[in-house]
Image (tube, rainbow, N blue to C red):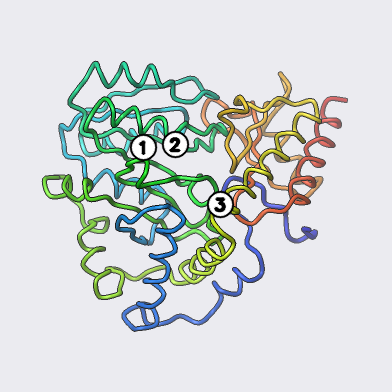
Amino acid sequence: MTTSTEPNLRIPGPVPLPEEALQAAARQMINHRGPEYADMLERMSDNLRTVLMTKNDVYFITSSGTGAMETGVFNTISPGDKVLAIIIGFFGIRFAEIAEAVNADVTKLEFPLGQACDIDALRDALRAEPNYKAVILTHNESSSGVSNPLEEICKTIHEESDALILVDAVSSAGGMPIAVDAWGIDVLATAAQKSWVAPPGISMVSFSRKAWQAYETCTTPRYYFDMQQYEDFLQIGQPPFTPCEPAMFALDLGLQSMVDEGVENVFDRHHSVAEHTRNGAEKLGLEVLPERRIASDTVTAIRLPEGLDGKLFVSQVMADHNVVLGGGQGELTGKIFRIGHMGWVEIDHIDEALEAAGSTLKAMTA
């Protein structure tokens, strides 16, 4: 349980860390060109493949999750390439903007906030343009608490096109099942500060053989995020550039803990906590933004009563109860609040957040 000096951090990342993760991050630095780092990198790579259910190449990059998204785009998509961007919220827009930054020809397939990608609409879009180089999408839209039906989306893309599939899984991977190889995902981007129980500073990318083929003809300029540099240095057990070692140490611990627990158990645990959160919100008389069938297992978006000042609500919960909730983003600003439940989270953390929300709502609507 939290103390007066340690808030209950319930935003959708960065996540709070247990004591063992904090201790791992606080250890002494090591030579990132030495054998100890090489051993750690090999272990982490193996464990990351296990969690992502892939045999593809995987890489650790010192950046935020957005850096991993940019890595995927800048290494596979060239100026003028036709790209279909599936957008269901704030981070889908960001992914499209990254593709536009390389002067790709981006078509946006947008859906209302709180809704997931409609498969029939996706199929129609792919049939209308048979020459898409890539389809880019956010799996789990943390801004709205919506989880796209990723397996079905990938299946449809493969049936209707030969497009690359680039997935922003920053807020889902590690907390929700993603079968990279079985679903045919070419590039997956995620980051340490979400379900992986580590501090910010490291992003992770999986890269398929098909993605490497696209790399060979990609003309987009890049340097820091050039995949070939990461591959070349990986072969000698090193990063191409100085890594964020504290985040790597904690991430190493987090990955090993997930594998030891069993990845299916990790996913089941996240789902159970998510259901508890959704049920708790409804007991307060509040409505979860998305339908249950597309609701995220890592963050829950909850509608606020009409006319309530959402920004004031979030700040009041913090002031009165020492609980940090996420507010709305973009068009949802002031209309919802979000409870993050990814990574290290216990039922009493959620109950404290819900109790604080309920008490504040009662005070504000009295």
Residue matched to label 3: 264
Q: Where in the figure is residue 153, as x and y percent of width and height?
A: 39, 30
Can the viewer see residue 98?
yes
Image quadrant containing the C terminus: top right
Dot 3 alpha-carbon crowd within 10 angstroms: few under 14, some 14 to 19, many 20 or more: some
Can the viewer see residue 171?
no
Q: Amino acid at mark 1?
A: Phe
Q: From mark 1 to mark 3, how far is it between C-alphas? A: 29 Å
Residue matched to label 1: 95
Q: Amino acid at mark 2?
A: Phe
Residue matched to label 2: 91
Label 3's element?
helix
Side of 209 where 321 appears, left or right: right
Label 2's element?
helix
Give the residue displayed 50% in from the left and 35% down from the top.
Answer: 141
Q: Is residue 140 above or below residue 34?
A: above
Dots 2 and 1: beta carbons under 8 Å?
Answer: yes
Q: Which mark is residue 347?
A: none
